[in-house]
Amino acid sequence: MAEQPATPAEAGREQCVTEALAKLDLPAKIALLSGATTWSLPAEPEIGLRPLVMSDGPAGVRGERWAPEDTAVQLPNASALAATWDPELVRTAGRLLAQEARRKGVHLLLAPTINLHRTPRAGRHFECYSEDPLLTAEIGIGLVRGVQDGGVGATIKHFVANDSETDRFTVDVQIDHRTLREIYLAPFEAIIRYASPWAVMSAYNAVNGTTMTENAALNAVLREEWGFSGVIVSDWHAARDTVRDALAGMDVAMPGPDTVYGDKLLAAVKEGVVPEPQIDRMATRVLRLAARTGALEGASVEAPYDGVVDGHALSNELAARSMVLLRNHVEPGGGPTLPLNPKGLRRVAVLGAAAAHPRTGGGGSARVFPPYRISPLQGLRDALPPGVEVSYAEGSNPRLSLPVIEGAVRAELYDDDGSLLSGADLSQASTNGLPELLGDVEVEDVRAVELSGTVDVAEPGRHVFEVRGQGRLTLIVNGKERFSGTLTLADPENPGAALLAPARKRVEMHLEPGTVSFALVKTDIDPANLEFALFSLAYSEPLPDPQRQLDEAEDLAKNADVAIVVVGTSEDVESEGFDRESLALPGTQDELVRRVASVNPRTIVVLNCGAPVLTPWREDVSGILLGWFGGQEMGAAVADVLLGVREPTGRLPTTWPDREDDAPVLATRPNYGELVYEEGVFVGYRAWERAGRTPAYCFGHGLGYTEWRYDSVAAGPGLDDTELARVRVRITNVGTRPGRDVVQVYLSAPDRADGPDRPRFWLAGFASVTAEPGDVAQADIVLPRRAAEVWTDEGWRLPPGSYQILAGASYRDIRLAAALPIT
């Protein structure tokens, strides 16, 4: 399919692009194809082209600075957005992200991540939407449309099969063509066809032997088959071969300025191994992106939405709407535990480190610095009446690492002679924004960087500093050298390891109360890799005795009317850059829940995580609420849901295992460089069904505060050849409260011995409905033709036969069925 302007308005932009390209010579065109900096493409004043700025942004727009001084509205993590099962609400989230991007001068958002939840051990699970390709596609379509409503480009990533983190830079994913098409390419295809994203990011990994930046699928599938007209940008440092990348159709190599393009690509063109018309096509796509986003003079920005989104209110709504009520025990002789009635409460025990210091966002590319964070402890204290006593104990701390020192920190750069070159004040002891400290200083002159400041010591004892980073580092405390040595990364070949998985060195020392000075110095600065001169200093007062912490929490819980325990994962076990070794909660958190539940029959657990965790105590507690990495308003939303101000309307986008070994797909570690997707199309609930195993909580599960009766389902023909059928489901709110439900429609294939091996049934459509008590709600759902098609050697085919439409509240809660004959 040839590249064509999508709208009449774009025709004018295309003319502007054509005229701009004609003014550039070959070196200038090639210059457009590499980053000028870590986050931007170069300006070209001759044609009115401004720097085109990119930013990470799955849960907030960080911008060009990675520093706490540059705050951004923080939304819940991607899996939480998918748990709303509401593409239109997610579209509003996209509009907010566009608003934030414009505020920060960003033209291209490097989001959403639409890789799949193939295994619960995947470290970046929280940044992806779902285990199901259709749900992933629908939520992704919503976000892309919202971002581009605001005149900012969206980048769907990582194309393709980047579904785990282990050896992600070198792993070769082995996957059959049917599985690739039906499962992993499916959400990319749907988003390109129905949301027209302006960019795609190619992944680090290889698929079936070819690295994705060099893969023929970039041109053959994305452009020729699907009609993608946007930019293909490499993941950071993923581009490795000048000629193969260019011929495959990868437009932009990031980050800059030193990439495989530039002078190397110019030489390849002059030698005749890369045709010059290919450069014209690549440069045209970059200029088209600039024209769409307002970075090219004379081109009108494509921004159909000009409203203002209240980021704080939206963050709150998304947090509440995404929360999944996993368990709500009915008390003997009474009703369900939740929602809590504030009038019946005198003492509330809030327990767990995450209650006071929750993870409100994921790590790595998803990390932003919000203007504030509301913890569950603060949210409950603010929401409960003045007469209710709210007590807190940490009980258990899941962090394996220590918190980075926050407060006034001075960063200074020095030359070979030890002369000060420049300095800046930071709000934490971390060099995330080191290139920005340069000012007018030449990078080649920098030979050392020092972070210095003070910490206030409240009690005597063995205090702990933790040095993080790579290379030669020296720690000085109160004027005395406490550590000097070289830290080595565990995975030095991973370009993001310095940021995502730094080496660590703990240094313990006795300190007396008072103000303690520190300095951390790095002396082996490589000017060519200043962006990765990343190091930081963390600190902790004497660590408490774990057993004493558990005892304190148990004592508080004994005398409370209700005990609310907030537990979850830490950035040490769930983050970008590495996969999870275990699904168990880190530290002594399981013991904390057990001990609290043993002394208080009204124990409610709030889970603060982005991916499945094991819940071995789930039958012993009264309620379980999945709060995700809930964004800056997480604590306020938790309080609203627990107290019944809002209903928990989230539904699981992924199956949660009972025992870790029950999960049908766990492997993340390649064997001799290859990771074989041997499960084929049986991913997620499809795999659970095939294995005959029962999970703790199934795909689509989620409880509410009212009850629903499913009354009828009817199917009619689709309106065109893209639609399989149109389904209408009627349900009645038979409870006592207004409510929202997610009506899920699954498709079951006919049993044919000569047909392809297929799941027993799979998601084909869904809709969110609301109703007052006693009222009927109607869900009208379009089932796409692709939902029933299979990929064969001849392309997509629709096997005929008598299909079944199944409607229900989750994968394991089917309420209605209807026949759907297909001839």
Image (cartoon, grey):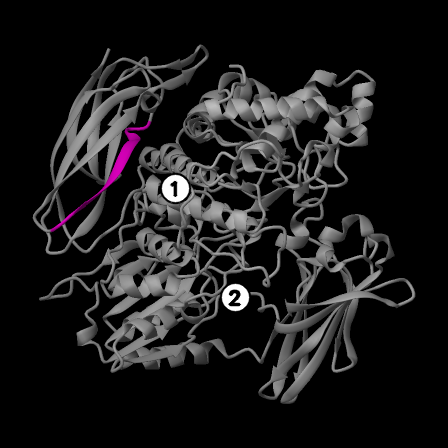
Instruction: Reply yes or no: does residue 768 show up in magenta.
Output: yes
First to last magenta residue range:
759-772
Disc number for residue 399: 2
**Mark 1 vs mark 2: which is more N-terminal?**
1
Any magenta on residue 701?
no
Q: Are there few (<14), some (14-19), or many (20+) residues within 10 Å of tag 1?
A: many
Most common secondary structure along the magenta stretch: strand
Q: Name the residue located 27 percent from the left edge and 13 percent from the top edge.
A: 800
The residue under label 1 is which amino acid type? Arg
Taking depth in this image into account, of 756 and 39 the one nearest to the observer is 39
Q: Secondary structure at mark 1?
A: helix
- The answer to whether residue 229 is seen in the rendering is no
Q: Is residue 406 visible?
A: yes
Q: Residue furthest front?
A: 298
Residue 791's spot in the image, x, y percent? 41, 18
Where on the picture, by quarter, is residue 448?
bottom right
Q: Position of residue 588 (x, y in %)?
A: 44, 68
Question: The residue tagged with tag 2: helix, strand or loop?
Answer: loop
Residues at circles 1 and 2 in contact by the CB criterion of under 8 Å: no
Q: Given the image, on which type of amino acid does mark 2 rest?
A: Arg
Left or right of 174: which side holds 598?
left
Please tell me whether residue 210 is drawn above or below residue 435 in the rendered image. Answer: above
Q: Which mark is residue 608?
A: none
Q: In the image, 515: left or right of 485?
A: left
Tell which of 208 and 125 is nearer to you: 125
Taking the spot 40% from the left edge, 51% from the top edge, the residue there is: 309
Q: Which mark is residue 91?
A: 1
Q: Tell me the distance, in whole angstroms, between the alpha carbons under discs 1 and 2.
A: 34 Å
Give residue 300's position: percent from left, percent from top.
53, 33
Badge 2: residue crowd in 10 Å (few <14, some 14–19, many ≥20): some
Q: Nearer the viewer, mark 1 or mark 2?
A: 1
The C terminus: image quadrant = top left
